[in-house]
Amino acid sequence: MTAYNFICIAFVTALQFLCEVTGEEAALTDLRFENKNDLRFYDDDADDSLGGDDDFYFQITLIEEEEKILGASIQSENFCGNDLNFFFLDVKGVKRNCAWVRGSENRRQRLCGRDDVICEPCKQSCGHCCEDDPNYTFTVSIENERSCDWIGSDPTRKATYCETQNNGRRVQDACPKSCDFCFDFVEKYSDVPSSGPSSAPTLTAPTQSEAPSECQDDPNWESGGSTTFSGVSCASIGDATEWCVLLADSVYENFSKTVNQACCACGGSRFQTTVPSLVPTEIIGGTAHPTFDPSTYSSSSPSSIPSNASRSPSTKPSGTTSIPSISSSPTKQTSSSPSICQDDPDWFSGGSTPIFSGVSCADIGTTSGWCEILADDKYENFSKTADQACCACGGSRFQSAAPLSSPSSSPVKITEYPSMIPSEKKSNKPSQEPTQNCIENSKSKFYYRKNQVNSEPVIRTCEWLESRNVWNKNDICSNYLETYDNIKPAREVCRKTCESCKSEISAIPSSRPSLLPSDSPIISRTTSPLPTDCIDDASWKSGSSEPVFSGVSCRYIGTDTLWCEALIADRKYDNFGKTVADACCTCAGYEVASVAPSTVATGVPSPVLT
């Protein structure tokens, strides 16, 4: 081949690729979103921000195009491969196809093995077959079309053409067999066990397999349960061993495995069995290091060597014993702590790690895995770690954070926030300015409400409340007044944001209305700015042209506030001059005056403003 011919071929190929990409982008703008089937929607990012069950599905919308991809060859009806006309939208509204499914092995295992919705149109991506399209041809030079058979086993042709875009498709997509672009078969698996035992026993004897040379994560495993940390896969854990401690709790068990049985980072693998082996281990002996947990049963004989005595006393008190110790005489002083342990309600973990910072004792609950993680000094806050502040970790609200043996001669600096307990002694002189009694910490937490799905408490911060719109603030500060596990409501915690601080009556009116109602009625008569009972705007639906988030009505939202967060995040979902917060009661909205004038005249004239 001469240099002139090679340059011509390269120029024609590049020009054809440019035209095909432009044509494909043009085809993507001509879509119909009419066929909304009640099928499964797969979100590979497993984002729970919009709700959903423990699985990673939501509602799916398949896309039917009026025309096939421009320039694509016609597929044979009997051709076993990926369907070129199969598309679906993910939860973010991004268009996906079979080529995207095969882009990640973890994604392939999850999507192909779970439902026919994906594996049926994406046969080649799911490894159900690997055949060349007999009707596909591609251009190798001017007026020179070739089929997949022409590639054959020639390595030069494979390297030159297989990864190029040609005649509306990537060559390796149409010629997977010739281009060695085949995938392993993905078997379908069930999320639930069968209703009954199999009709016939297994005839083959179990075989003893050798351990693999390299540890491999179980690709199908993810943490179970229904909490924030459910749905975490081994790939998500990576090398972050903190997850191993947290997910070792039995509440996160799934597919009969916990994280330390399924993930290599935590000591497990895809080959680890969850039932005992048929043959016992050959050697039974002592371990190289002592175990962290005591044995369930006592030993049959005492140890031959006693343990060495400690040279210094332990820095922490011993744990609670099953049998109380008996002293020779009663204590001289009464106990300073109550008989029932109480968490420190103001404590939460420090640090800057997104997942493990800002965790309160209420978040820990009875999950002991948190205690081991948050015992690290980097999570210390308010001079305490979790094992000093939280009952589940051995602490309490009455535990001292090691004060000095003698008081300081003078304060170093004025603290940013007032102390929770008043001083025992009076100051030598009065303060020069009146006391500021309306101060709040943006990180302080308040009890909002119970989760409508799992009844778990929803805890928010004053910083979060400050970011809400005025209607939402008013609703939370005025109507959500319950206390949960010593965590007070927003009105008592975020007093500045809720404007619930007590102050003298001002002779000058405020520049904006208060968020909370006054304790006594005012003298002058004014019309109420809000209706007594909140009523949804029945005619309102979300705008935009996205299939998942457009056309959502207040009735469809119901009591699911997660829709509120999604639809208020972008003004493109506004409709009829209103946001979802203005139209739907669940989203803290009320019936307000419409931006556009009404088409029907009211029966009573509006009052004249003076």
Image (spheres, helix red, strand yellow):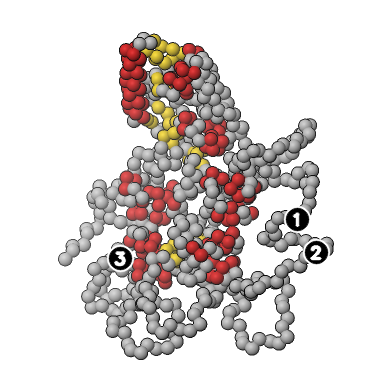
Q: How many marks?
A: 3
Q: Mark 2 points at which residue?
A: 304
Residue 519 position (above or below residue 110): below
Q: Can the viewer see residue 590? A: yes
Q: Do the residues bearing badges 3 and 2 touch, measured as CB atoms within 8 Å?
A: no
Q: Point out the tag, 3 or 1, that comes first from the N-terminus.
A: 1
Assign the C terminus to one quadrant of the image: bottom left
Query: Is residue 268 or residue 588 the one in the foreground?
Result: 268
Q: Which residue is drawn at 72% across and 78% down?
A: 325
Q: Position of residue 547 (x, y in %)?
A: 40, 38
Can you name the residue that lies furthest to the right here?
300
Q: Which residue is drawn at 40% across and 47% down?
A: 553
Which numbered circle lies on residue 286?
1
Query: Is residue 369 or residue 435 the one in the foreground?
Result: 369
Assign the N terminus to one quadrant of the image: top left
Amino acid type at circle 1 is Gly
Residue 95 position (above or below residue 501): above
Q: Mark 3 points at which residue?
A: 528
Amino acid type at circle 2 is Ser
Badge 2 marks a residue whose secondary structure is loop
Q: Point out the tag, 1 or 2, that comes first from the N-terminus.
A: 1
Q: Position of residue 212 (x, y in %)?
A: 66, 38
Query: Is residue 4 or residue 557 the one in the foreground?
Result: 4
Amino acid type at circle 3 is Ser
* Real-space Cα separation, disc 3 to disc 2, in angstroms: 85 Å
Residue 272 position (above or below residue 394): above
Query: Is residue 252 or residue 485 the one in the foreground?
Result: 252
Q: How crowded is mark 1: few (under 14 residues within 10 Å), some or many (20 or more)?
A: few
Q: Residues within 10 Å of mark 2 (few under 14, many from 20)?
A: few
